[in-house]
Image (tube, grey):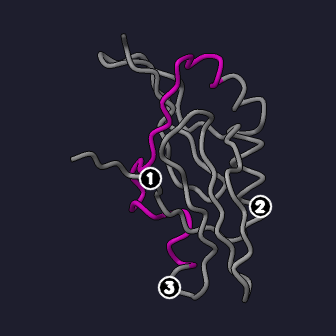
Amino acid sequence: MKQRISLVALVVRDYDEAIAFYTQALGFTLLEDTDLGDGKRWVRVAPPGAETALLLAQASNDEQARSIGNQTGGRVGFFLHTDDFWRDHTAMSERGVRFLETPRVESYGTVAVFEDLYGNRWDLLQLNA
């Protein structure tokens, strides 16, 4: 049996601002943007070459809106692995991504925490070989 996680839903304030951030600031690819009617869209973005994508889900009520930027209770909830930490850290910083700490070398690799446009915390991580 083979299984995999294909999508992770991320509640966002606005489809277009989220698409702009993930594609421009993080360099993700827009995989799909399908109009479902009634203001809903099916929007998928992913890092180049990734198997798992983010489903950008615009909040449709107050309860969902309250979770924007705090989907993991303030913890790092998303992990962006890279094959070149310094290349991506530099590029992301130049595109306005806010890193919350100085990059650090740990026993497992090089890492730094950053925030997305809503305040969700991410690790940019290059694992040791």
Local packing at callout 2 (Cα closer than 10 Å; few below 14, some 14-19, many 20+) is few
Q: Which residue is mark 1?
A: 6
The circle drawn on residue 90 is none
Query: If you read the primary sequence from the N terminus, does the residue marked by circle 1 or circle 2 appear first?
Result: 1
Query: If you read the primary sequence from the N terminus, does the residue marked by circle 3 or circle 2 appear first?
Result: 2
- Image height of 53 relative to 68, above or below: above
Q: Residue at x 48, y 30 (%)?
A: 81
Local packing at callout 1 (Cα closer than 10 Å; few below 14, some 14-19, many 20+) is few
Pair 3/1: label in front: 1
Q: Which residues are magenta?
A: 65-89
Of residues 123 and 103, the one nearer the viewer is: 123
Q: Secondary structure at mark 2?
A: helix
Alpha carbon distance from label 1 to label 2: 23 Å
Of residues 46 and 124, the one nearer the viewer is: 46
Q: Which residue is mark 2?
A: 17
Percent coordinates x, y for residue 60 in the rendering: 61, 84
Percent coordinates x, y for residue 99 in the rendering: 60, 36
Q: Amino acid at mark 2?
A: Glu
